[in-house]
Structures are given as C-alpha cells and as structure tokens.
Amino acid sequence: MPRTLRIFIASHQNDIIPQQTSLSEKIMQALTDRELYQALEYAKSIDETTGRKIMADFQNDQTMLAQMLFGIFPGIIAEQNQDMAHLFMDLCFDLLCVFQKAFGPLPAQNELDIDWLQKQAMLLDTELQAVKKNQDMDDKIRNSLQERMISRTHDETPQSGLIAFMNAAVDDYASENPSRVPATQITQELILVAIRLFNNLYTHSRKS
C-alpha cells in the first residue's frame, strides 16, 4: 500500500462513520473523508484469498473494463516505467474496492445497454490516443485532447476528493525514485479515466 494511503487511514482511524445515504442519492455526490476512510480501510483489510475472488468476479462481470484497467492501461504506462504500471494496478484494485464498499456490487457488463457501452468505448479510444507518447500526433491536438479528458472526468464524476487522494498517492510513489517521475502524468491521467469509468457504470446502472 502506498505511503499516502497509510497516512490517510491512520489520520482518520478514530473517525465516526456516519449513517450511509441510499445508493441512488450517494452515487451523485462525493464521498466524505469518513466514507473514503471506511472504503480504504476495507481495501487494506482484504486478504489474498478474498482479493483473488474480487478480481475473478470483476473479470467475469466486467470483462472489458477489467482488460482495460489491468491490461491495456498498465501496458501504456509500462512503456515509460514498469514500477508505475504496477502502482496503477494496485490503485485500480483499491478503486474497485472503494466503489464496491461505498456503492455496492459493481453492475455486470451484460446488464448494461450495448449502445451506451459502444459510446463509452469510442470516447475512450480517442482519449487513449492523446496519452500514448509514441502516438504520432500534433502537440496542440494532444494537449487539447488531454485537457478535454480531464475536464470531462471532473464534469462526470463528483469524486474530487478521491481523485486528489489518488493523485497524491501517485506523486508520493514517484518521488521515491527519479526514474518513475516521467510516468507520473500518464499514470494520473489514466487513474482519472478509471475513476470516471467506475462512476459512470454505477450512475448508468441506477438510471437503467
């Protein structure tokens, strides 16, 4: 677990967890520090056996998302630094646990509207072209796409506290080794995308 996660959990371990609102209400609002602490504490407490089951269920229920978060995205980051790719997968597992603890079981892929899934995939493909450093693209176009991706993420998810926390975890880990620093931006950008995808899945499933 990154040092930032340990510090956050330690600083909130005496917090009283308030009564949870309903999923339909809470999915549209940001997690409080207490709710985030509770979810991160849950992620921290998971043993290897339980963790393997969570991952197996995730891969079965959300095959496309699992391939992106634990295959495609880490592969893009690994082109710049392998350590940061491993951190990204660790943080994505934490995100999976945080969202399931806070908002309930992740909706299954076969329960979602096909047209909506295809639209998400098309938008994501455009954004990925912007973060790939080896992609032949004009810098102005790349910067514009990256800015649009960040803006879209903040517009579509209210989880600003979770985003800030994950960004801090990436910064903290990168600072431990200079070779990791060049991959900081792409790791944070793809963490933003991961948070947005999780949030959109829950929001869309509640509306369906």
Image (cartoon, grey):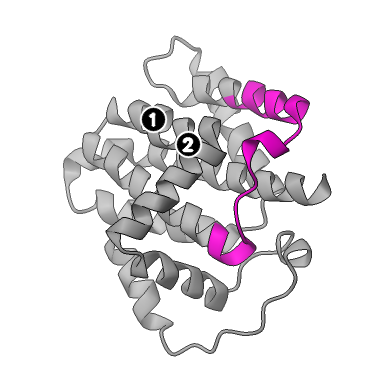
Q: Residue placed at 59% from the left, 47% from the top?
A: 198
Of the pair 132 and 6, the residue shown nearer to us: 6
Q: Where in the figure is residue 168, as x and y percent of width and height?
A: 39, 58
User: Which amino acid type corresponds to the residue marked 2 in the rendered image?
Assistant: Ala
Q: Residue furthest right?
A: 207
Q: Where in the figure is residue 80, as x and y percent of width and height?
A: 27, 29
Residue 191 appears in the picture as rendered: yes
Could you say whether the residue bearing mark 1 is in a helix, strand or loop? helix
User: Which amino acid type corresponds to the residue marked 1 in the rendered image?
Assistant: Gly
Please give left or right for residue 24 compared with residue 63 in the image.
Answer: right
Q: Residues within 10 Å of mark 2 (few under 14, many from 20)?
A: some
Could you say whether the residue bearing mark 2 is in a helix, strand or loop? helix
On the image, numbered disc 1 is attached to which residue? 71
Alpha carbon separation for disc pair 1 and 2: 7 Å
Q: Residue placed at 37% from the left, 26% from the top?
A: 76
- Magenta residues span 100-124
Q: Residue placed at 63% from the left, 36% from the top?
A: 109
Number of marks in picture: 2
Q: Quadrant of residue 13?
A: bottom left
Q: State whether the magenta stretch is mostly helix, strand or loop.
A: helix
- Looking at the rendered image, the quarter that the C terminus falls into is top right
Q: Is residue 27 above or below residue 109?
A: below
- Looking at the rendered image, the quarter that the N terminus falls into is bottom left
Q: Where in the figure is residue 84, as x and y percent of width and height?
A: 28, 41
Please give left or right for residue 207 compared with residue 162 in the image.
Answer: right
Q: Where in the figure is residue 187, as x and y percent of width and height?
A: 39, 40
Question: In the rendered structure, which disc, 1 or 2, sits on the residue that comes first in sequence?
Answer: 2
Q: Quadrant of residue 99?
A: bottom right
Please give left or right for residue 23 compared with residue 36 in the image.
Answer: right
On the image, numbered disc 2 is attached to which residue? 66
Q: Is residue 120 above or below residue 46?
A: above
